[in-house]
Amino acid sequence: MTLEEGRRVRLAEDLGIGEALAGEPGAVVGFLSLGAGTEGTVERVEGELPESHEVREYQRLKALFEDYGHTMPAASRERLEAEIAALEPEWAAHRERGSRVTVRVRLDNGFVLDGLHQDVLTPV
């Protein structure tokens, strides 16, 4: 789903917000959550993180290996495999942090959720 400002969305699952406090300082009396189905409007969309030089290099080398690795001399192929392996941690970190789009949503009940992952929203 492509999110854009002004689009109506609905929570796809319950979201736990935090503990409800009352009475004596720090006395927990419940838990606050927003139920699935709560609707709102997207106010802002934060795109994916830009790719670093290392990530682009990993993609380039990986494509090279997949397309031409079988035709390379053994020493060249091994060196390319070693370069790809050295960049693997950066690639994995990018996929974890950069593959998600976050949004700011103003719910109809007045709550505002900022930094919310798009995965928990469905279009209305």
Image: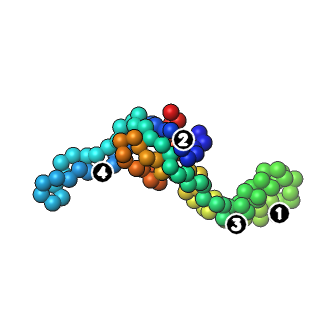
As helix, strand or loop, the secondary structure at mark 4 comes to strand
In this rendering, the label closer to the viewer, 1 or 4: 4
Where is mark 4, residue-wise?
Answer: 18
Local secondary structure at mark 1: helix
Q: Nearer the viewer, mark 3 or mark 2?
A: 2
Looking at the picture, which amino acid does disc 2 mark? Answer: Arg
Disc number for residue 76: 1
User: Badges 2 and 4: C-beta atoms under 8 Å apart?
Assistant: no
Mark 3 vs mark 2, CA separation in Å: 34 Å
| Badge 3 or badge 1: first in the primary sequence | 3
Which label lies toward us, 3 or 4?
4
Percent from the top left, x then y, of residue 91? 63, 59
- Residue at 51 percent across and 43 percent down: it is 119
- Asked if disc 1 and disc 4 are in contact, CB closer than 8 Å, the reply is no
Colouring method of the image: rainbow
Disc 1/disc 2 C-alpha distance (Å):
51 Å
Give the mark nearest the N terminus, 1 or 2.
2
Mark carried by residue 53: 3
Q: Is 83 or 17 nearer to us in this picture?
A: 17
The quadrant where residue 4 appears:
top right
For the image, the number of numbered tags is 4
Residue visible at 30% across and 51% down in the picture: 18
Per the image, label 2 sits on a secondary structure element best described as loop
